[in-house]
Image (tube, rainbow, N blue to C red):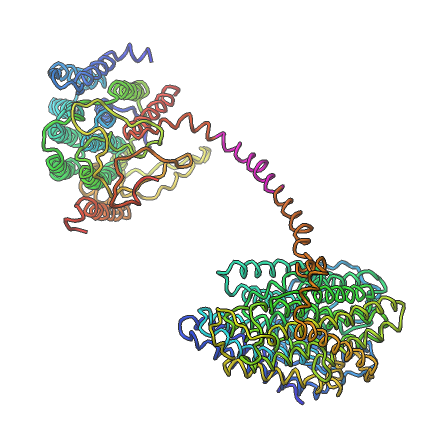
Amino acid sequence: MSEMTPLNYEELRSLMVAAGLFVLGAIGFLTRRNLILLVLSAELMLHGVSLSLVTFGKIHQNQEGQAFTIFVLTVAACEAGLALSLVLALYRQTHSLDIRLWSELREFDTPVPVMADADGPQSLPSAYDGIPLLTPAGRQPRELPRTVNADPKRPDRTPV
Amino acid sequence: MNEWMQQHPASIGGLVLWAIGLLWLMPSGKPGKSRPGLPGIILAAAGVLAFCLGAGRGIDTLQSEVMFWTFALTALLCAALMITSKNPVYGALWFALATLGTCGLFMLQSAPFLAAATIIVYAGAVIVTFLFVIMLAQQSGAAGYDRRAQLVVPAVLSSFVLLGVVVQQLQTNPLKVERPGIVAAEKQSTTKGSATSPPPLPSPDAPIPPPPPVIPAMLSKATPETPVGSMKGLGRSLFGDYLFAVELAGTILLVASIGAIAIAPRREEGAL
Amino acid sequence: MSQEMLAPLLCLIPAAPLLSAVITALLGPKLLKYRSHIPCWSALAVSFAASLAVLLLLPQQNSAATAGFIPPPDMVAAPEAESGAATAPAAIPTLAPTTAADKPEVVVYIGEWLALEPAPETAEVNPADTIPDKNRQRSGMRVPLELRVDSIASIMLAMVTGVSLLVALFGSGYMHHDPGYPRFFAAVSMFVFSMCMLVMSNSFVMLFVFWEMVGLCSYLLIGFWFRKPSAAAASKKAFVVNRIGDFGLIMAIFLIWTSFGTVDFAGVLGNPDRIQAIAATNSGVITLICFCLFLGAMGKSAQFPLQVWLPDAMEGPTPVSALIHAATMVTAGVYLVARCTPLFVLAPQAQLLVTGTGAITAAIAALIALTQTDLKRVLAYSTVSQLGFMFMALGCGAADPGLATMAVTAGMFHLFTHAFFKALLFLAAGSVMHAMGDVIDMRRFSGLRKALPITHWTFLVGAAALAGVPLLAGFWSKDEILAVLMAASRTGEHRLFFGSILVVASLTALLTAFYTFRAYFMTFWGPEKFPEEAGHHPHEATPIMAWPLRILAVAALLIGLAVGPTHLFSNTLAKTTGLTPFEAHFHLDVMALSVFIASAGIGMAWMLYVVMPKVPGTIAVVLKPFYVISQGKFYLDEILYVLVVLPLRGIAFLSTLYDRLVIDGLIDSLGTVPRVLGDRIRSLQGGVVTAYAGLMWFGLVVLVVICLGIS
């Protein structure tokens, strides 16, 4: 009824471009430190995926590739909205978009990751709150030498 | 692997040039002496060109060739510029351009509705939102963390290794695909043409062919009335086979918008 | 008299206190508050009235009968079992050649409480088991919720509810303005319910359940002022010591079930031939059952060496001491042994143990009571001592099985009278305590007879009754105990044993008279002296406290005379299953002895504490070692601590060591494996979000390269 045919070069190069877009998005996600650029890179990866879905849909002669792409579009829109509002909330805490500042969830005995930047804060400023303090994982909690958020008005938030 | 390298020198060279261009373009973090961007752009463009040429050349119409090259180069180059731009505003704009290129490729893959929708959603909504956020969050030009990338070499190397492996697989073991829609349509037309002659009776000696597997009638299948990418076919797929998922996606959108409203504003400034 | 009338009355006796307990517990703290006594009073009054009615109507019951609600349909299949259980005493000749008409009893079926599936047939048929009995056929265990009243139970019920009512009246005055007022009455109601159910239970399992319930109520009420460390410790001690006894009781129930195949009173006790058959095939088992039962009784009734909890239980409110730890709960052991007389008759060793333990307890407690200065503790040791008296009497059947009924009658009679005069004494002591601002040390007050006239007179009546002054309650019952001991010392092979017991009992009676009046004289005679806690004008008992005292005093005066010489008590009690009526007569020799004993003890107390108040100090100095031993309560607490608690602590310490070192070590060493592994890769969690994404990405790359490179 039907026979197996190889991909033609149009389909092949479309898939290759899709792979390229995906990889570029991944590189962006890994190398950049700006929260907004990270979200954009993730969107780029989604573009790559969408393109390959569309291409495969055409190859297989059905609508599912495009239907899935519409779902990807929807989820991407949701993700963008939520991610941006999160970015805004984070920015309000630190007045910086550097992702390196958000290293509070590290193991308690690993050093604070610092990059030698010419400007910008090197660690979280003291004026953030609304973030729960978490117990370090893995071992019995012990006193952490952390003074940045010793807030006299809220003694319950001082590290124990 | 070696065989592939010898057969597709363009792909290998393209990948290498592209990677070097990216490495060149990546922000290095020294504020005084930032590298000029042009050599990197040229390298990357050459790499992208060679990479896409590796797919082979066909004898399709000139129009579609031009469109493909334009869109593919736009998408990949603008993506490369987006991930290397020091200024997030430029990054967002490059991203918009890359989106346009992708949408062009969508169009070439017979997805015009999707191309339009993506442009509307991304260029019309997402990018604008991004720009608003960038303007809200970053008033003072390029910050230190934008001028200095991290993990550059490992990320680029590993990513291009992945890309190389994938491309090698695509080129050496091209997927054999069943193209049922077209074949079935062609066969149908041929049988319609010779409808007067009765179908030959199966000889009693011939082995009885196994009954065809019962496949539920999927609305997503392309038919001559609803070819791939047609609004009608897409609509039948979405609101036929995937109606429940569509509803779910709508709910997710609603939840996400409520979440965004809940998260973003400052508490003391109202709104939840 | 038709049983249709008795059945609701029977149900009413425990139902009213239960309802009161629930109401008081639910509504008391918020709604009733200092009106919480109202449900308790009314419920106890109803119970008392019902008990009196049952006591009066029961002898007119012509035959044993079963009444109650219609059993559920699945139980209809075995109506014979039920009626068989109830009418067994009627159909089967009992130990005594009496007809069933003499053994009135009423059983009210309320519902099924526990029904275990039949065990697989063991095909082992006891050859002695000649009597067809529905309960015997290995039918699993069936414990219906039944109320059963016979003569002994009706007497107990009337006594329990009557004393409870008076104590509740007194308690509302005594506990006035205590923040735990509702709690007190809820617990007292609950206790009365449990005690009534204990008395009315128709099987050993139900008895055990309510045995534990009264223990629980006792725990709650001893620890009523739980913020006081001594009260909390005392309640804990009472609970733990009682567990030892409960162990014995539960072992006895297991033994009864395995050897009798049923736990019904009717099936076990109402069938002397079967008991004898079992004793014939397995002679040890009845004795073992009796030992275990007596161990249970020892715990509840504070017999040596488990008596240590009762004096400490005086940390509870005084009405509680009067009700639970003098009149009712502590006599449950005596009741149990009396109830199980058909078993004990066949176990002379166990009876000897009962008598011996009773004698030792009575003597030791009396000796300790000689030197105590805490009024309530004197009374507590007196309670222990009197309980010892009761057990002394109960064991007298060992001399001659014919004496068993007389022995049980003596013990139960003493239990009965003791409940009244000891409750009276405790309530009077409570009145003293109330007036003295909760001071109970007799050295700190004296000469109260002018300040507290009602308390003085009522205490005097109680003390005289306890000392055995002629014609008062204690005189008659103690007289019977001495009489049965004397009879036992004249017959049988254990003459010498019972003779020495008689001597001990007489001396203990002398000591009893002496320490009782020592306490009386020390409290009410001598120069008038008040502790500063009392203020300058100690207030006499309020009417609500005084009237129970007066009523109890009248009871202590007259009840012995009313039911003792008239043989009313013994005739009623003899209608209990397993007991035989006996020809009671006066023992003038014993009476003379006890009159002499009482007057000697009282006279000695008078001489030492009124006429020559200096002498006791001198005696204490001269006989210092004895004085110290008595004052130190024979150091029984300490001895038990060394003998029992320390070894247990040692075992616990070893267990702890084993747990900490071996088990914990094992688990910890298992835990180190993932910990060591985790320490290697823990540094990857450096807090850099990009690094996490990078790890994912590198992993993906490696995976894809491996998968595609291989293909």
State whether residue C685 appears in this view. Answer: yes
Q: Is residue C491 left or right of residue A38?
A: right
Extent of the magenta region? C654-673
Residue A54 can be seen, yes or no: no
Percent position of residue B161, x then y: 29, 18
Secondary structure mostly seen in magenta is helix
Please tell me which residue is depicted at 15% across the width and 16% down the height of the picture: B40
Q: Please tell me which residue lies in front, B106 or C562.
A: C562
Q: Does the magenta stretch include residue B34?
A: no
Q: Nearer the viewer, residue C31 or B206?
A: C31
| B78 with respect to C576 (left or right) | left
Residue at position x 16%, y 23% from top? A118
Dividing the picture into quadrants, the one containing residue B74 is top left
Tell me where residue B195 appears, x and y as whole percent.
Answer: 27, 39
User: Which corner quadrant of the image does residue C355 belong to?
Assistant: bottom right
**Residue C283: x %, y % from top left:** 84, 62
Locate the N terminus of chain B by quadrant.
Answer: top left
Does residue C348 lie above or below C94 as drawn? above
